[in-house]
Image (cartoon, grey):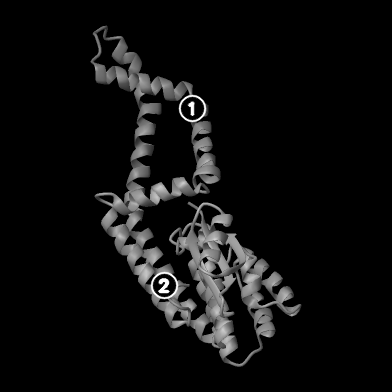
Amino acid sequence: MPVFLYEGKSLDGSTVKGMIDLETQDDVKEMLRSKGIFPISVRENNKGATLEFNIKKGIPFDHLAILCRQFYFTLSAGVPMLRAIGMIKDQIEHKRLRKILDNVHEEVQKGSALSEVFRKHKDIPFMLTAMVEVGEATGNIDQVMEEMADYYDKQHRQKKKIDAALTYPKFLLVFAICIVMGLVSFVVPTFVDSILSAGQELPMPTRIVIAISDFINSNFLLLVLMVIAIIVVKKLFIDTNYPIQYQIDKFLVTDKYLGKITQQIFTARFARTFAMLVKGGMNIIE
């Protein structure tokens, strides 16, 4: 089910913002009206609902931490926002982030708010945009940037720990696949002739290995194309399909072996994120 971000006006004139899972935008608007809220904007944003658990997409956490830290240093030193953006964008090494900041500098120069420009760029995490908006409303955007820098720095360190823990199993898996492929493709064919010349009936396991070797050698290009096709399908259809990603995440959380560590990781991230949002001035519902 898609996730929608909404903004509306209540009967007393206050602004109401939030996030909800419903089928369509019309359902969201109908829900808001039933609660006495006049909808101003309703937009789909699945990225915000994931709390950035998918760490393989978008701008890396360490670059986001550097960006927020530089914002904190410049703004806390009394540098105006526009000049701070101009100073920071020339020091950013990440090319995509530097390009975004070039556009941010132009839009802010025209009078737009920083959070308003951030919202237009999908590569900027939703939570960073929301926290910047809170900082602009409360007047403590420098403190918000410091908290976001600490947050992304912790996310980066946690990601590095997870990657380090998975490095050895990944290496063993790749090494085993390479060894098996090498044996089946190059070693087995050199012994096939001598095995067949013995004239005896071969056992079933031996016949299976020979059949696999023949298949790989005669269809090597086809197998390579199949692997490439699987990678493309994964990137274009599986990684961008919300229902499929939901089922994958559900498996990671409920699996007998992976569930415990996954729940610990996600719970830690949720607690850290929730504490920072509330501390930054955002109300509980938002």
Q: How many labels does the image show?
A: 2
Q: Residue furthest bottom?
A: 78
Q: Which residue lies furthest to the top in this view?
A: 199
| Residue that carries the numbered disc 2 in the rendered image | 273
Name the residue at 46% across, 47% down: 243
Q: Residues within 10 Å of mark 2 (few under 14, many from 20)?
A: some
Name the residue at 25% across, 17% down: 204
Q: Quadrant of residue 40?
A: bottom right
Q: Can residue 67 be seen in this view?
A: no
Q: Nearer the viewer, residue 6 or 126?
A: 6
The amino acid type found where label 1 is placed reads Phe
The amino acid type found where label 2 is placed reads Thr
Q: Which of 66 and 137 is in front in this view?
A: 137
Q: In which quarter of the image is residue 284?
A: bottom left
Q: Can residue 105 be seen in this view?
A: yes
| Residue that carries the numbered disc 1 in the rendered image | 220
